[in-house]
């Protein structure tokens, strides 16, 4: 008798499952199609992104070769084209390299290119700071101390990645603009930073020796 009841229960369960399948099978099939399509789309995206990165890498290497061959105009053009269409990582590098190539023909134009990068928040803080330093370096001989101070003072903070270079350029700018008080201020900052690179410390000491002695009160 129990076996009969078991068979009946099994038949009822099969009938219920069949009703559920008949009712919801279209949704289940649609879900499976969506999952397969999503996986396929993701795989295709990964493939095309990898392909674009490989193409950008090859183009970047060719532009570097042009630069190493002193074909700066051709290199600048190649880097500029790459910056317009490459994936984000290569795009920022290409913009920086294009500005570096432009520096050989027009330092002010190159400084403007670096300024544009420094103002672009999408490239990230470290790249922005680097662009600020590069632009200031190109203008060091021509800009006023006030201009250099505006450009670089924020980069002299104790934890700033490029604080050493920023302090040195401000010291040089102050000295060249006959502001010995400001020059001494930045040279003291260089001397007081235990992480100042040895080469930069030596240059700072040499510049310190050129400053007039502090007047005794």
Image (tube, rainbow, N blue to C red):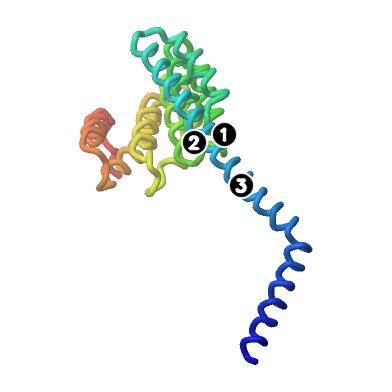
Q: Earlier along the polypeptide chain: callout 3 or callout 1?
A: 3
At a point 40% along the width and 42% down the height, the residue shown is: 156
Residue position marked by numbered label 3 in the rendering? 36
Q: Earlier along the polypeptide chain: callout 2 or callout 1?
A: 1
At a point 63% along the width and 91% down the height, the residue shown is: 2
- Kindly report which numbered mark, 3 or 1, lies closer to the viewer in this rendering: 3
**Which image quarter is the C terminus in?**
top left
The spot of residue 9 in percent (x, y) is: 68, 82
Residue position marked by numbered label 2 in the rendering? 128
Residue nearer the viewer, 41 or 103: 41
The quarter holding residue 190 reads top left
Q: CA distance from mark 3 to mark 1?
A: 43 Å
Instruction: Tell me how many marks there are.
Output: 3
Residue position marked by numbered label 1 in the rendering? 119
Q: Earlier along the polypeptide chain: callout 3 or callout 2?
A: 3
Q: Give the class, few, some or many, for how many residues have Cα within 10 Å of label 1's Cα (few <14, many ≥20).
A: some
Left or right for 123, reference 169 = right
């Amino acid at each position: 008798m129990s076996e009969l009841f078991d068979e009946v229960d099994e038949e009822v369960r099969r009938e219920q499952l069949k009703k559920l399948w008949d009712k919801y099978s279209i949704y289940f099939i649609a879900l499976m199609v969506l999952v397969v399509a999503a996986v396929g789309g993701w795989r295709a995206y990964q493939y095309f992104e990898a392909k674009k990165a490989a193409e950008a890498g090859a183009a970047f290497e060719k532009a570097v070769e042009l630069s190493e061959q002193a074909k700066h105009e051709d290199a600048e053009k190649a880097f500029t084209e790459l910056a317009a269409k490459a994936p984000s990582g290569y795009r920022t590098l290409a913009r920086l390299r294009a500005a570096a190539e432009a520096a050989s023909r027009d330092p002010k134009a190159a400084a403007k290119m670096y300024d544009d990068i420094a103002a672009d928040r999408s490239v990230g803080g470290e790249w922005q700071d680097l662009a600020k330093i590069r632009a200031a370096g190109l203008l060091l001989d021509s800009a006023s101390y006030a201009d250099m101070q505006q450009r670089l003072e924020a980069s002299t903070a104790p934890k700033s990645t490029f604080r050493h270079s920023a302090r040195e350029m401000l010291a040089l700018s102050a000295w060249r603009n006959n502001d010995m008080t400001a020059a001494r201020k930045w040279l003291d900052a260089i001397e007081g930073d235990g992480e100042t690179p040895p080469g930069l410390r030596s240059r700072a000491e040499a510049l310190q020796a050129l400053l007039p002695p502090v007047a005794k009160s």
